[in-house]
Amino acid sequence: MDLIKGMINPDESWRLGNADLIQEFATLLWVEKGEDDLMKKVTSARIVYELYQRLTGENEMDAMRNETIAKIAKWVKEHPKATKEEVSKELTKQITLFAKKVDQM
């Protein structure tokens, strides 16, 4: 019943990212017309992209970058009256920590 309700009143969980939408389109063409050329290309592209992300550590670096930004934002929020020098010192500290993590990759 929840599945049917979700189809009638879809929320964000039903939304597809760009790659997923292309994959679904390729799947539909394959099911409807037996065309598997697009499906092969889309699947190959997604596999190559994912392997690249994993081998280069891009996903891990993105996570570390987001963590650094979150820490800076939290500090700024907790110190609304900080001077420019204090903000600069905290930014330098967080960026230095980020750089050390990247160097350890």
Image (spheres, rainbow, N blue to C red):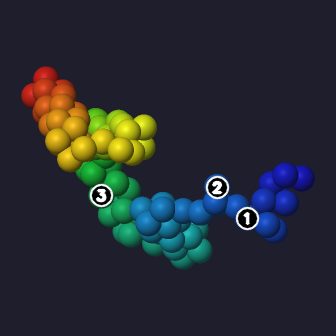
Is residue 21 visible from the viewing direction of this image?
yes
Residue at 44% of width from left, 66% of height from top?
18
Residue at 59% of width from left, 63% of height from top?
15
- Element under label 2? helix
Q: Is residue 56 above or below residue 37?
A: above
The quarter of the displayed image where residue 73 is located = top left
Q: Where is mark 3, residue-wise?
A: 45
Disc 3 residue crowd, few under 14, some 14–19, many 20+, Cα 10 Å: few
Mark 2 touching mark 1, by CB under 8 A? yes
Q: Where is mark 2, residue-wise?
A: 13
Q: Closer to the N terminus: mark 2 or mark 3?
A: 2
Q: Where is mark 1, residue-wise?
A: 10
For the residues labelled 1 and 3, the Cα–Cα distance comes to: 29 Å
Q: Nearer the viewer, residue 82 or 74?
A: 82
Give the percent coordinates (x, y) of residue 92.
15, 37
Give the percent coordinates (x, y) of residue 82.
30, 42
Q: Is residue 28 above or below residue 67?
A: below
- Element under label 1? loop
Give the percent coordinates (x, y) of residue 33.
54, 76
Q: Nearer the viewer, residue 49 or 94?
A: 94
Is residue 70 visible from the viewing direction of this image?
no
The quarter of the displayed image where residue 28 is located = bottom right
* Residue farthest left in this picture: 103
Nearer the observer: mark 1 or 3; the answer is 1
* Amino acid at dot 2: Ser
User: In which quadrant will I find the C terminus?
Assistant: top left
Q: Is residue 15 left or right of residue 55?
A: right
